[in-house]
Amino acid sequence: MKDLKAVFLYSPEWDAINYPQECPYDTSRAGKTRSTLLSMGLLGGKQQKEVKPIKATRAELEKFHEPAYLDAIKNAENGHLTPEAFAMGIGTPDCPVFHGMYEYISLAGGASITGARLILSGEADVVFNPSGGSHHAGPKKASGFCFVNDVVLAAMVLTESKKRVLVLDLDVHHGDGVQNAFYERNDVMTISLHESGKTLFPGTGFETEIGRGKGEGYSINIPLPVGTYDAAYEKAFKEIALPLIIKFDADVLIMEVGMDGLSGDPLAHLNLTNNVYADIIKQILHLEKPILATGGGGYNVESTVRGWALAWSVLSGEEEHDLGIGLGGVMLETTEWLGGLRDRVLITDVGIRETVDAEIQQVGNYIRDNVFPLHGLT
């Protein structure tokens, strides 16, 4: 595999703006990820560079979001939260009003647009926007900590340049806003591995949601049961998602690398380690396609930062460098990371494994029976 031109997107303005303290969404994760990478010598190599993203313009945001909705966000920040705005999801516990919110979402959204353009220009092979991944937002709806859907905006930039786009969403929550945006299109395939809507917000993303019209077969959902562990997750990816990814043969891949599937995340119920994310990224890199990676969820901040630092190290080809046992802990000033960025292997009870495996097998059977044939797969 060739040396990749890797771009890490970061703006110091992100560090100055945060959601209210009582909200689980923590914008400091991007800056902390960057600090971790710098401390470990994983940012600034010959083929790597850090780029300050360009803020999305109003016209760019309006390519997906309705003007009245964007006005409502701005007005709410200025102290005018109307019943209409509240009905749009603005000012709710998960999408609260806070100082600098319009600035933040314009910059986070603009970062993924910046990433898409760096790929189109050939300046980057892989781009990581840790402040992106707002996959729940709709054209006129804030939801799940998300105000502006940067994933949709980036995909639209790519499709406007006649690129076929594959969105692979590894966040523990279903990417409903992204799926809805492209549900009737066949130039964008969305594949989401997530905790089942039976047990987790937003209550969507069942295997029966496969697209409509010319988009039939281009929305793929792999809902996962509580307790899903690394081997089951990776098997679902290899046997269900990967054949479709290869067959679709996208020009560009967008990956949402939310870390809320990690064991111990306070808002979800899977039992993953960051090793599975790293291993899936490696498999995607072997396809030799440009990749725009975004952050997303992850509400145990320390685990999320470590996971994103690992994701970047794999994306940029730096993980192969042996950091040495113990070095990670010294550099990161924590005894929990003595072996570097990868998590320790977790042991899952046999009974749980059997239950998880059976549920995922059912999902796989449905997709193989109803989606694979639409793409000539058996």
Image (tube, grey):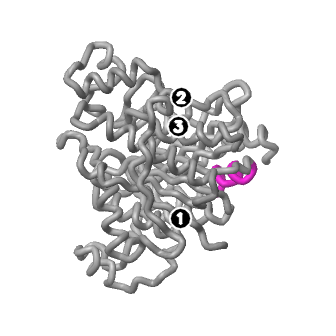
Q: Is residue 355 visible?
A: no
Give me the disc on residue 6. Answer: 1
Disc 3 on helix, strand or loop? helix
Residue under label 3, please give it. 153
Q: Is residue 189 above or below residue 287?
A: above
The residue lying at 21 percent from left, 36 percent from top is 99
Disc 2 on helix, strand or loop? loop
CA gap between label 1 and label 3 equals 21 Å
Report x, y in % for residue 324: 39, 86
The residue lying at 47 percent from left, 53 percent from top is 257
Using the rendered view, name the quadrant where residue 183 is placed: top right
* Residue 305 located left or right of residue 319: left
Using the rendered view, name the quadrant where residue 308 is placed: bottom left
Q: Amino acid at mark 3?
A: Leu
The residue lying at 59 percent from left, 44 percent from top is 191
Please tell me whether residue 254 belongs to the stretch shown in magenta: no
Q: Which residues are magenta?
A: 238-247
Q: Nearer the viewer, residue 263 or 77?
A: 77
Give me the disc on residue 295. Answer: none
Is the residue marked by circle 1 packed among few (<14), some (14-19), or many (20+) residues within 10 Å?
A: many
Disc 1 on helix, strand or loop? strand
* Residue 80 located left or right of residue 320: left
* Residue 264 located left or right of residue 46: left
Residue under label 2, please give it. 63
Quadrant including the N terminus: bottom right
